[in-house]
Amino acid sequence: MEPAQIVGLLLIGYIIFTIDKRTQLFPRPPVLVLIGMLLYFIPFFDGIQLSEKTLYEIILPALLFISAYKFSVGALKANSWIISLLSTVGLIVTVLGLGGGIYLTASLFTTLSFTEALLIAAVLTPTDPVSVTSILHKSLDNEKVGDIVEGESLINDGTSYVIFATLLSIHQGHESFSFVSFLGEFLYVAIGGAVIGIVFGWIVSRAVHFTHHQEYQVMLSIVMAYGLFLLAESFGISGVLATVAAGLMLSWEFNRINKEDHYRESLDHFWDVVEPSLLSLVFLLIGYTAVDYLKWEWLGFAAIVFVLSLVVRTGIVVLTAQSVPPVRRNMSWQESLLISFGGVKGTMSVVLLLLLEASGTEGIGTVMTLSFFVVLMSLFIQSLGVHPLAKLLKS
C-alpha cells in the first residue's frame, strides 16, 4: 500500500467520522465498508492489499487494547454471568448449531463438508461492538445491553480464534477431533492468555508511577498493547485474550488506586486519535477486500446463512438468559433480543477469513465467498437496524 493511498483512506475516514459526530445520523462502519467497496473501482487505489499479518498483528492489538482499558470493570462484574457464558460455552454451542444448519442447508445449493460448515460458523461467531454499542447506549435508558454486547465481544474474539484454529487443523487433516484434546488446548490457550495479561497489566499499572511525563506513559502503553500480544503468541497462547486481560487489569487498577492522577487521560489523548484512524482503515479495507470474493450467484445461500446465524444466536442468548438464575432475574426478553441482534460480525471475522486464505488450504472458495457475504449483510442490516429495533422494543 502506497503512502498516498493511506493518506487518502485516512482523509475519507476523517470526513465520515466528522459528519457522524455532527449529525449522528448513521453507524460509521457500514458506511465506510460501502465506500471501501466503491474505492475498488477507482484507479488511484489499485493494488491495495489487506494482509492477515497487517490486520492481526498491527491493527487488532491496538483496537483490543483500546476497547479493554476503556471498558468499565464494574460493568464486566455486573454482567459477568451472561458475558462469560455467551463468550465460552455459548460460542461453542453456536458454532455447532450454526455449522449443523449450514451443512444441512448446503445440500440445496452445493457440496459442503461438515468441517467446512463448521469453519464458516466459527468465522461468523465473533462479534464486533464498534457498530452498535454507541447506538444501544443512546437508544436505551440503561447501559446494560450495550455493556453486555461490548464485554462479550472482548472475550469471544479470543475464544473464537481458538475454536477456528482447531477446526482448521482438523479440516487440513493434521489431527482428528478429540473433545478432550480440544478442551485441553482451549483451556491452555485461553487461561494462559488471561493469566499473562493480568500479570503484565498489573505490572504496567505500577510502572507508570516511575514517570510523570505523559509521553512516556503513552510509550509504555504502546509497548504493552503490542509487546504483550506478540509475547503471548510466541508461547502459543492467546495474544487476543492477553491484550484484553491486560487492558481490563489496567482499567481496574486506574479506578482503584489512581483516581487522583491523570494516567487514563494521558492515554486517552493518544489512543483517541489512534482508534478512529485504525477503524477508518480497517472498515474501508474490509469493503475493498470483500469485492474480490463476492460471487453474486451465492447471494441466496448467503442470505439463508445470515438468517440462520441470527436465529441460532437468538436461541442461544434467550436460552442462556432464561436458564441461568442470576441472569434470568435481571434480563427481560426485549434485552435478550437486542443482545442477539447486536452481535454484529466485523473485524475479527475478517481476520479469521484472511488467516484461512493465508493457510493455503485448498477448496475454500465457497467458505470465503459465503462468509464475506454474511459479514457484509451483518454490518449493513444489523448496524442499521439496531436503533429502530431498540425503539420498537422500548415502546
Image (spheres, rainbow, N blue to C red):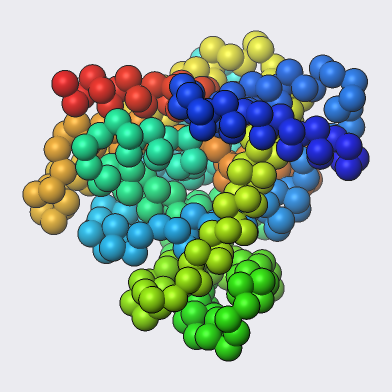
Q: Quadrant of residue 116?
A: top right
Residue 62 pos. (x, y %): 62, 57
- 88, above or below 95, in the image: below
Q: Residue at x 54, y 12 (%)?
A: 300
Q: Nearer the viewer, residue 99 or 262?
A: 262
User: In the drawing, does residue 173 fall left or right of residue 264?
Assistant: right
Residue 64 pos. (x, y %): 55, 56
Q: Residue at x 88, y 37 (%)?
A: 4
Residue 111 visible within the image: no
Residue 107 pos. (x, y %): 52, 20
Q: Quadrant of residue 221?
A: bottom right
- 293, above or below 344, in the image: above
Which residue lies most toward the bottom here?
210
Residue 390 visible within the image: yes
Q: Nearer the viewer, residue 233 or 15?
A: 15
Residue 308 pos. (x, y %): 40, 26
Q: Quadrant of residue 279?
A: top right
- 172, above or below 385, in the image: below
Assign the C terminus to one quadrant of the image: top left
Q: Residue at x 66, y 76 (%)?
A: 216
Q: Residue at x 28, y 26 (%)?
A: 390
**How many discs appear?**
0
Assign the N terminus to one quadrant of the image: top right
